[in-house]
Amino acid sequence: MGRVKKVKDIQKQLQFAESRLAYTAPARQTGTQATQRMKTPHQYQVMSHVGTTVLTYTVRASVHALEFFGDATGTELGLGEPAADGSPPRGFKTAKIHAVKSVGKAEVVTAKPSKRPYLKYTPTGGQSSYSAPITSKEGVTGVVSTVKTIYAAKKEVVGPYGRIYFTPEFYVIHE
């Protein structure tokens, strides 16, 4: 059995729902485009063992993320100059390193549609999350050492509630 809700809680939920229904998103000005992060092509070497040949593909990476993790060329993340390698197979996901910046003290922010208060730990204004493909010619051990190096260099930048994490490569062997 669930607990019985108090009238005050139900009234508060009703207020949030009414505010959300009454909210209309501001219209974008005519002639303006949605902001998109610039991405550049880079060569990515597949770390999964698929046959005897070394597979490389051209992938796109955010310029801002590459600059955050090292340099805009992507050499610190093991990426190379783009070549005529072609695109990866359907379902392929590169190994990625992610970072989320935070501030030391949470800020109470009110959601525009519902006027519901919530805590925000990311910095106001500017980009607060980054992700970029990462690879290494040495394979998984090279990527692990690169991730540890980046973690040591960026742990002060991401803040006390920020995080840096890694997602492994996913290579589809059979379709």
Image (cartoon, grey):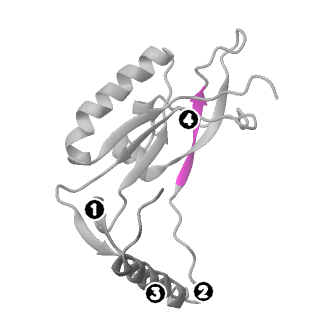
Residue occupying the point 65% across, 17% down: 54
User: Could you give the CA–CA distance between mark 1 and mark 4, rounded to whole angstroms?
Assistant: 33 Å
The answer to whether the residue labelled 3 contacts the one labelled 1, judged by CB atoms less than 8 Å apart, is: no
Residue occupying the point 35% across, 39% down: 164
Residue underneath mark 3: 19
Residue underneath mark 4: 81
Q: In terms of secondary structure, where does tag 3 sit?
A: helix
The answer to whether the residue labelled 1 contacts the one labelled 2, judged by CB atoms less than 8 Å apart, is: no
Residue underneath mark 2: 31
User: Could you give the CA–CA distance between mark 4 and mark 3, rounded to whole angstroms?
Assistant: 51 Å
Q: Is residue 175 magenta?
A: no
Q: Nearer the viewer, mark 3 or mark 2?
A: 3
Q: Position of residue 55 (x, y in %)?
A: 67, 22
Q: Earlier in the sequence, mark 3 or mark 1?
A: 3
User: Could you give the CA–CA distance between mark 3 and mark 1, rounded to whole angstroms?
Assistant: 26 Å
Residue underneath mark 1: 123
Task: Give the camera-side residue of 116 and 72.
Answer: 116
Name the side, left or right, on which 27 lies relative to 162: right
| Magenta segment | 39-45
